[in-house]
Image: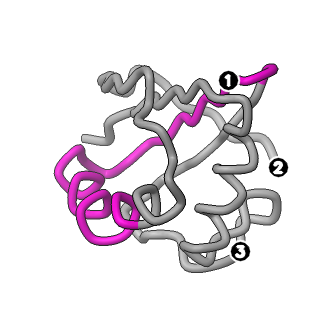
Amino acid sequence: MPELLVLEFSAPDAVEHYRTVSRMLDVDPSSGSGDWPAPLVSHVAGEAGDKLIVVEVWESKAVQEGFMQSRLGPALKEANVPPPTRVEWFALAGEMHRH
């Protein structure tokens, strides 16, 4: 069953970190193009001041953890991104996409 992940970052340059890591991963959050991991069902991010929230739906927590180990974790480290201030998993209760 899919699971929802919330990541929150708080830093003056949080949005620039997000853009840098996206480029490193060869993904374009504005168009959805690039090398997104197949088990990632959806991804959205929003910012307010020095805060960035990323909300993702993954096929499972285990596949996200594999992506974190293999690609995302190393990119976050290389870009000197401070650790998230919040990492929280939720059971998916509903989903809607409007195109």
Mark 1 belongs to which amino acid? Lys
Q: Nearer the viewer, residue 62 or 14?
A: 14
Q: Quadrant of residue 25?
A: bottom right
Name the side, left or right, on which 43 lies relative to 77: right
The label shown at residue 33 is 3
Mark 3 or mark 1: whose residue is earlier in sequence: 3
Percent from the top left, x then y, of residue 44? 65, 41
The label shown at residue 99 is 2
Which circle, 1 or 2, is nearer the viewer?
Answer: 1
Secondary structure of residue under mark 1: strand
Q: Which residue is mark 1?
A: 51
Percent from the top left, x then y, of residue 73? 34, 58
Name the side, left or right, on which 75 lies relative to 53: left
Percent from the top left, x then y, of residue 86? 41, 21
Indicate how the structure is coloured in the image.
Answer: one colour
- Disc 1 to disc 2, C-alpha distance: 27 Å
Q: Quadrant of residue 67?
A: bottom left
Percent from the top left, x then y, of residue 31? 81, 65
Q: Residue at x 48, y 24 (%)?
A: 94
* Stretch of the chain drawn in magenta: 48-74
- Tally of marks: 3
Mark 1 or mark 2: whose residue is earlier in sequence: 1
Q: Quadrant of residue 30?
A: bottom right
Which circle, 3 or 2, is nearer the viewer?
Answer: 3
Q: Is residue 54 magenta?
A: yes
Q: Is residue 9 magenta?
A: no
